[in-house]
């Protein structure tokens, strides 16, 4: 089955802790993306990567970090510097940056 | 259409009616546009796309119209069904420059289909 897998589906974090969200794709896509979605709002771009070992900041990168060491994987770390991390996080990939992006099912992060 | 803030636009229709969802995009340099459907608690699902060299594109029960003069995009859904109830997002992609590969989403429209 080809697709994008995000894990875990639900994640709870204590204030002051870093947490890493996983995103894996077996679609052989070059481009990958991380978005944040707050209730009743659209998707805001955190980071994106057009190719392995390269990534760019999106509109709301502060408090987040990423790596792209493998084509299939684009993990997102939510650091303690992110002041309001509770949100729904969505990972996506596309065969190239100028084509449609396909999304995973999301990770809902809650700070307790 | 799209709006800024916490309250998404809503559209309520009866089953079998046609639905039109509007989107005003922001960047005149954007050359690729996509419509997504998002059901509650799930990731967005691709519906249809259109490039800036086209004014209209049709899929199965859906049509996207692009008016570059006024930077407006619309999604038409024919014979709307209860399963079409979801939040619909438009997204724009600037094909060059420093924003290459950056897909920017609108705020979304809630579509509710009544049986």
Image: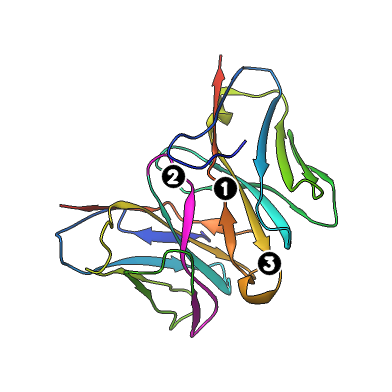
Which residue position holds label 3? A98
Is A2 part of what is drawn in magenta? Answer: no
> What residue is at 57 percent from the left and 47 percent from the top?
B106
Alpha carbon separation for disc pair 3 and 2? 24 Å
Secondary structure under the numbered disc 3 in the rendered image: loop
Q: How is the image coloured?
A: rainbow
The front one of A36 and A5 is A36
Which residue position holds label 1? B106
A11 vs B2, left or right, is left
Q: Main secondary structure of the magenta part?
A: strand
Image coords of residue A17 (percent x, y): 17, 67
Judge the density around disc 3: few (<14), some (14-19), many (≥20) Cα neighbours within 10 Å: many
The front one of B109 and A108 is B109
Q: Kindly identify which chain the residue marked by label 1 belongs to.
A: B
Q: Kindly identify which chain the residue marked by label 3 belongs to.
A: A
Mark 2 / mark 1, whichever is N-terminal: 2
Asked if B87 appears above or below B98 in the picture, the reply is: above
Asked if B84 appears above or below B50 in the picture, the reply is: above
> What residue is at 37 percent from the left and 71 percent from the top?
A75
- Number of the label disc, if any, that sits on residue A70: none
Which residue position holds label 2? B42
Q: Kindly identify which chain the residue marked by label 2 belongs to.
A: B
Magenta range is A39-56
Judge the density around disc 1: few (<14), some (14-19), many (≥20) Cα neighbours within 10 Å: many
């Amino acid at each position: 089955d080809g697709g994008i897998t995000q894990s875990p589906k639900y994640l709870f974090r204590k204030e002051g802790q870093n947490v890493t969200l996983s995103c894996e794709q077996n679609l052989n896509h070059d481009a990958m993306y991380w978005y944040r979605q707050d209730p009743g709002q659209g998707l805001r771009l955190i980071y994106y990567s057009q190719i392995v070992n390269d990534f760019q900041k999106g509109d709301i990168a502060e408090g987040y970090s990423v790596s792209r060491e493998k084509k299939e994987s684009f993990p997102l770390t939510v650091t303690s510097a992110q002041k309001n991390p509770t949100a729904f996080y969505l990972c996506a990939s596309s065969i190239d940056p100028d084509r449609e992006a396909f999304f995973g099912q999301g990770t809902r992060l809650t700070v307790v | 259409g799209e709006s800024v803030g916490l309250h998404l636009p809503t559209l309520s229709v009866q089953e079998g009616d046609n639905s039109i969802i509007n989107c005003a995009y922001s960047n005149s340099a954007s050359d690729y546009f996509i419509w997504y459907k998002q059901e509650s608690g799930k990731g967005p699902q691709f519906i249809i796309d259109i490039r800036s060299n086209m004014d209209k594109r049709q899929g199965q029960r859906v049509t996207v119209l692009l008016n570059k003069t006024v930077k407006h995009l619309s999604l038409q859904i024919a014979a709307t069904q209860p399963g079409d109830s979801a939040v619909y997002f438009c997204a724009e992609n600037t094909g060059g420059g420093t924003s290459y590969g950056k897909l920017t989403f609108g705020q979304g429209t809630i579509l509710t289909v009544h049986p």
